Amino acid sequence: MTMVESLPHYAEAEAVAKARGSNIIDMISAYLAGVAAVGERRVVKVNTVYKPERSSSGRIVLPAEWDDPEDAIYDNM
């Protein structure tokens, strides 16, 4: 028994593989092939989200270009 095989998670993974009619080596190979085919996960930067400014009274001030000239919803605010 190797050091990896003595880990408790290895035994759990081996049991899952047997329940699915496979073995742990085939499941690891399939996982690695999938990672190689798909690539790394895309990381979304948190700072790409719009953060509104606040006026001196604490109200949110939206950018002027967001105002739609066809409606008067924000004209009197």
Image: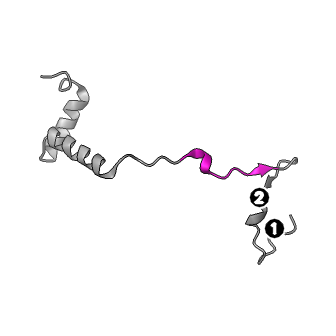
Position of 72 compared to 1: left or right?
right
Instruction: Please tell me whether mark 2 or mark 1 is closer to you in this view.
Output: 2
Image marks 2 and 1: residues in contact by CB distance under 8 Å: yes
Measured from the top left, where is residue 53 in percent x and y?
77, 50
Vertical order, 50 against 66 (above or below): above
SS at circle 1: loop
Residue 48 vs residue 1, the one in the foreground: 48
Position of 70 compared to 39: left or right?
right
Q: Give the class, few, some or many, for how many residues have Cα within 10 Å of label 2's Cα (few <14, many ≥20).
A: few
- Range of the magenta residues? 45-54
Q: Is residue 50 magenta?
A: yes
Q: Quadrant of the C terminus?
A: bottom right
Q: Which mark is residue 62?
A: 2
SS at circle 2: loop
Measured from the top left, where is residue 41 in percent x and y?
40, 47
Residue at mark 1? 74
Residue depicted at 83% across the width and 47% down the height: 58
Measured from the top left, where is residue 34 in percent x and y?
27, 49
Position of 20 compared to 56: left or right?
left
Q: Amino acid at mark 2?
A: Leu
Q: Is residue 8 magenta?
A: no
